[in-house]
Amino acid sequence: MGPSPSEVDVVIIGSGQAALATAYFLRRTGLSFVLLDAEQAPGGAWQHAWKSLRLFSPASWSSIAGRQMPADTVGYPTRDDVIDYLADYERHYRVPVERPVLVDEVRREGERLSVGSGSRRWLARAVVSATGTWRHRFIPPYPGLEDYIGRQLHSADYVEPRPFAGKRVLVVGGGNSGAQILAEVSTVATTSWVTLAPPLFLADEVDGRVLFARATERWKAQREGRAIDLPVGGLGDIVMVPPVRDARERGALHAVRPFSKFTVTGVVWPDGSGEAIDAVIWCTGFRPALAHLQALDLIEQDGRVQVDGTRASKCPNLWLVGYGDWTGAASATLIGVTRTARSTVAEIRSELATRTSDL
């Protein structure tokens, strides 16, 4: 027999901004809780972002509940600024985190949920899944992909442009990661930018503050059942941060439609012409990292879990926070997750109080 399970009111799986924001509100309820983090150190998936990554908003618009990100950075905060902020947040609030703990599965055990990691188990009255998407990269299927012998990596594994110096590189994907990675790789390599549709560039003066305000207004209008007229532009459109503006000035932001297939050494374009390619960087996004929930039989064909707000419709003591708009408007962002974390904890508190009173 393995060790006896640890019993706790709430288990939070993850320790990025969604998990920490949820912990902030939980610590004020008197409920016992623990965060289980698969990483070796604080900072969540930000630890794996490329070195030059910068946020789209200043520090004052890049904070989670209760504690502002320091505003002493020059320009928009960097990846390292975010990691330092989340580590400081964790220390300041003495968040109970156990790491590294990679959760293998969550199972029903009577009215509670059993959370397992190897031989260890936690029994919880409620579970919050806040694992994000980083561990579930998406690469689209392509004819001949398995035959291609050049280098391939996902944006999740991209660090810096130096390894691509002098190479012929395809950057595939039309979002902000594609634009930012293309911008710096194009300074050292010959690049082509492949997107499904022409990229949508926001005006130079539009940044994350504007996008969040628009997302919030859309969310309010949807809840109130009213129509609104807002400018085109959402959280997925390309923000013209300085490196991207520089790439525009160099003429490097020209995007082309997808190639037809891979060959052993490159790709074939729709007109039938072939081109040798040394490396492909897939900036094609992520899917929710929910493998730990497989045993609950909740994951739908689209890779998501049906939710009412953030609460799993088919498992009433499971909540999902921070996966994107399907778990709350702008909930995958630093500034946007506070709203859904607050409402999630309010639901958990009410639910557990109701269960206690029924005993």
Image (spheres, rainbow, N blue to C red):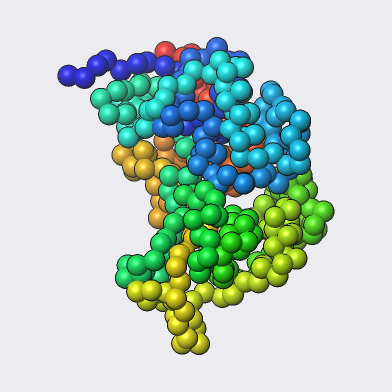
The one nearer the camera, 303 or 161, is 161
Q: Would you place residue 3 above or below residue 176 in this image?
A: above
Quarter of the image where one finds residue 334? top right
In this rendering, position of residue 265 left or right of residue 59 = left
Quarter of the image where one finds residue 310? top right
Q: Residue furthest left?
A: 1
**Residue 234 placed where, x, y %?**
69, 55
Q: Residue at x 42, y 16 (%)?
A: 8
**In this rendering, does residue 108 appear at all?**
no
In this rendering, position of residue 293 left or right of residue 220 = left
**Residue 218 placed where, x, y %?**
72, 50
**Residue 164 placed where, x, y %?**
51, 60
The one nearer the camera, 132 or 78, is 78
Q: Residue at x 51, y 34 (%)?
A: 44
Q: Residue furthest front?
A: 166
Q: Residue at x 32, y 35 (%)?
A: 104
The one nearer the camera, 49 or 89, is 49
In this rendering, position of residue 287 left or right of residue 293 = right
Quarter of the image where one finds residue 92? top right
Quarter of the image for the C terminus: give it. top left
Q: Residue at x 39, y 66 (%)?
A: 150
